[in-house]
């Protein structure tokens, strides 16, 4: 069964550095998402992406964040200048077209900002 | 703004006992409700969604618009049901945006 993959599984970075989190969605899916979960808190929506543009973003997704689908398979989340509070588990998800479809989640990347 | 509340952080039952995981939501329109589950060391995965009206692994959930609830139930819990359960809502123009509750850790004791 196809799965969403994410790399790396764990990333440690220093405050102020740029990080790129990578995701490979399921190949015939058209909608892509990023969520994050700070330790002990709920899973929070960051951004959705369709047809090479952002469909919706949350208030968390400020100018420090960007997403890109650089080729036909990867979907990336970039944080330009990381802060301590960016430390969290970041989940990528993808879904087929249409409303209320199941979102398939990746295993997550744990980002630690020191 | 849409919101999901799962009042129980932890829930423990014995094998064979009924289980109910509570979920309340706030949303002014007609949302779609989901239950996602995360088993130990596995990824988040869909358990069931209201629109499908399915019963998965013996779990059911009924949308009660009057009480704005979508509680998850199973008549006889199994040890393999032990996991983290998240209620989530997707609504209106926020297409694809899932809003999650805090999650409930269910432990089923032998």
Image (cartoon, rainbow, N blue to C red):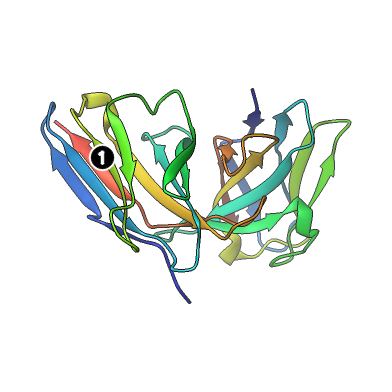
* Chain that bears disc 1: A
Find residue A91 and report its horizontal and vertical position in percent. Answer: 39, 48
Q: Secondary structure at mark 1?
A: strand
Q: Residue at x 69, y 37 (%)?
A: B91
Q: Is residue A9 left or right of residue A90?
A: left
Find residue B69 and report its horizontal and vertical position in percent. Answer: 78, 36
User: Which is nearer the eye, A29 or B32?
Assistant: A29
The quadrant holding residue B43 is: bottom left
Find residue A107 and report its horizontal and vertical position in percent. Answer: 37, 57
Q: Residue at x 76, y 42 (%)?
A: B70
In this orientation, does residue A32 appear?
yes
Q: Quadrant of the C terminus of chain B?
A: bottom right
Q: Is residue B89 left or right of residue A5?
A: right
Does B12 sit above or below residue B82? above
In this orientation, does residue B110 appear?
no
Find residue B47 and report its horizontal and vertical position in percent. Answer: 63, 59
The quadrant holding residue A103 is: bottom right
How many badges with numbers are in the image?
1
Q: Is residue A12 left or right of residue A41?
A: left
User: Which is nearer the eye, A112 or A46?
Assistant: A46
Q: Residue at x 33, y 42 (%)?
A: A67
The quadrant holding residue B95 is: top right
User: Which is nearer the eye, B13 or A29?
Assistant: A29
Does B61 sit above or below residue B23? below
Does A113 sit above or below residue A69? above
Neighbor class of circle 1 (other Cα within 10 Å; few <14, some 14-19, many 20+) is: some
Residue lying at the far right in this picture: please name it.
B66
Q: Quadrant of the N terminus of chain B?
A: top right
- For label 1, the residue is A78
Q: Residue at x 18, y 28 (%)?
A: A81
Does B27 sit above or below residue A47? above
């Amino acid at each position: 069964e196809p799965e969403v993959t994410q790399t790396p599984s764990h990333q440690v970075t220093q405050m102020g550095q740029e990080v790129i989190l990578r995701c490979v969605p399921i190949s015939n899916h058209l909608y892509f998402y990023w969520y994050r979960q700070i330790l002990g808190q709920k899973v929070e929506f960051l951004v959705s992406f369709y047809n090479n543009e952002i469909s919706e973003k949350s208030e968390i997704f400020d100018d420090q964040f960007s997403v890109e689908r650089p080729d036909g398979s990867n979907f990336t989340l970039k944080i330009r200048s990381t802060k301590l509070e960016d430390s969290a588990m970041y989940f990528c998800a993808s879904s087929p077209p249409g409303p209320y479809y199941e979102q398939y989640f990746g295993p997550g990347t744990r980002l630690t900002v020191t | 703004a849409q919101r999901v509340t799962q009042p129980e952080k932890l829930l423990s039952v014995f094998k064979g006992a009924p289980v109910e995981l509570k979920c309340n939501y706030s949303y002014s329109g007609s949302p779609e409700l989901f239950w996602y589950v995360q088993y130990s060391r596995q990824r988040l995965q869909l358990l069931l969604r209201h629109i499908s009206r399915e019963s998965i692994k013996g779990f059911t959930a009924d949308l009660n618009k009057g009480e704005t609830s979508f509680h998850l139930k199973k008549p006889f819990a199994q040890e393999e049901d032990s996991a983290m359960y998240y209620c989530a809502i997707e609504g209106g123009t926020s297409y694809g945006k899932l809003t999650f509750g805090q999650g409930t850790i269910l432990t089923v004791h032998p």
